[in-house]
Amino acid sequence: MKTVKKLHHVNAWEQSVTQGSSLVTTSGIAVLDDLLPCGGWPKSGLAEIILPDPYCNPMSLLLPALVRLSRKGRWLAMVNPSYPARSGILRESAINHDRVLLVNPHPGRSALWTAESMLFSGDCSVVMTWPNCNTELMGKRLQRAANHGRALGILFRYEGLVTQPSGVEIRLKLEIDTQGRAIYLLNSKGETLAGAAL
């Protein structure tokens, strides 16, 4: 696992969140909050998490925040979730399961179109999707839908399906090896900006 120091850079999005911390919800994981550009997950916006393979369960990165958000009245949606992620959220006893939607789109509809509709609706606080496809244009549409619906959209992608460059606000990469797990913050071109062991 490579070691990367945190590089601080303030962009326009970071400045707007710095001025109003209510636009961010803590991840509940100190090293992840230190890594995220604004000290937590944005309440409105799009994040991409790159996973090594479909068997990886990324929910440990999100569960502390999802537990809190599940008690606030809006939906937590999972669109076309992988089996490890679906079972991970359903096994978590602290989650309010009455607020969790598991959506497997009709064969005639794509997971990205479904996620876009759910983000746009304003009924979800978080929409997580495993699209199994790769389009930069769809990332831009999801970003607009997330901002309109005041929701956090999370795209889970596998290493073989990564767009270069990516226009999402937050881009993370999860690595797992014999030494453990690490999370890296990437820029739009996929270059590592910072990293931390989990």
Image (tube, grey):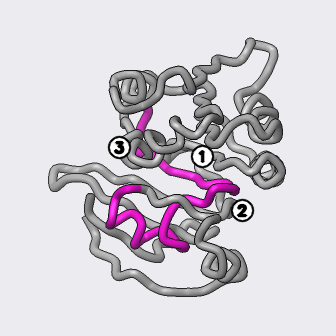
Q: Does residue 76 sit above or below 171 in this rendering?
A: above
**Residue 81 in the image: x percent, y percent?**
54, 26
Left/right of residue 106 with respect to residue 66 in the rendered view: right
**Residue 155 in the image: x percent, y percent?**
60, 44
Q: Which of marks 2 and 1 is nearer the N terminus?
A: 1
Quadrant position of the N terminus in the picture: bottom left
* SS of the residue under disc 2: loop
Q: Distance between the residues labelled 3 and 1?
A: 14 Å
The three-letter code of the residue at mark 3 reads Ser
Asked whether 150 or 111 is in front, the reply is 150
The three-letter code of the residue at mark 1 reads Ile
**Residue 74 in the image: x percent, y percent?**
65, 35
Magenta stretch, residue numbers:
28-54
Question: Label 1 crowding class (10 Å Cα cut-off): few <14, some 14-19, many 20+?
Answer: many
The stretch drawn in magenta includes residue 46 = yes
Q: Residue 154 carries which label?
A: 1
Asked whether 2 or 92 is in front, the reply is 92
Asked whether 68 or 124 is in front, the reply is 68
Quadrant position of the C terminus in the picture: bottom left
Q: Residue 8 carries which label?
A: none
Disc 3 designates what residue?
60
Q: Does residue 2 sit above or below 151 in this rendering?
A: below
Asked whether 5 or 177 is in front, the reply is 5
Disc 2 designates what residue?
167
Residue contact between numbered discs 2 and 1, judged by CB atoms under 8 Å: no
Question: Label 3 crowding class (10 Å Cα cut-off): few <14, some 14-19, many 20+?
Answer: some
Q: Which of marks 3 and 2 is nearer the N terminus?
A: 3
Residue 131 visible in the snapshot: no
The three-letter code of the residue at mark 2 reads Gly
Q: Does residue 70 sit above or below 62 in this rendering?
A: above
> Which residue appears at 69% of the width and 56% of the height?
44
Q: Distance between the residues labelled 3 and 2?
A: 25 Å
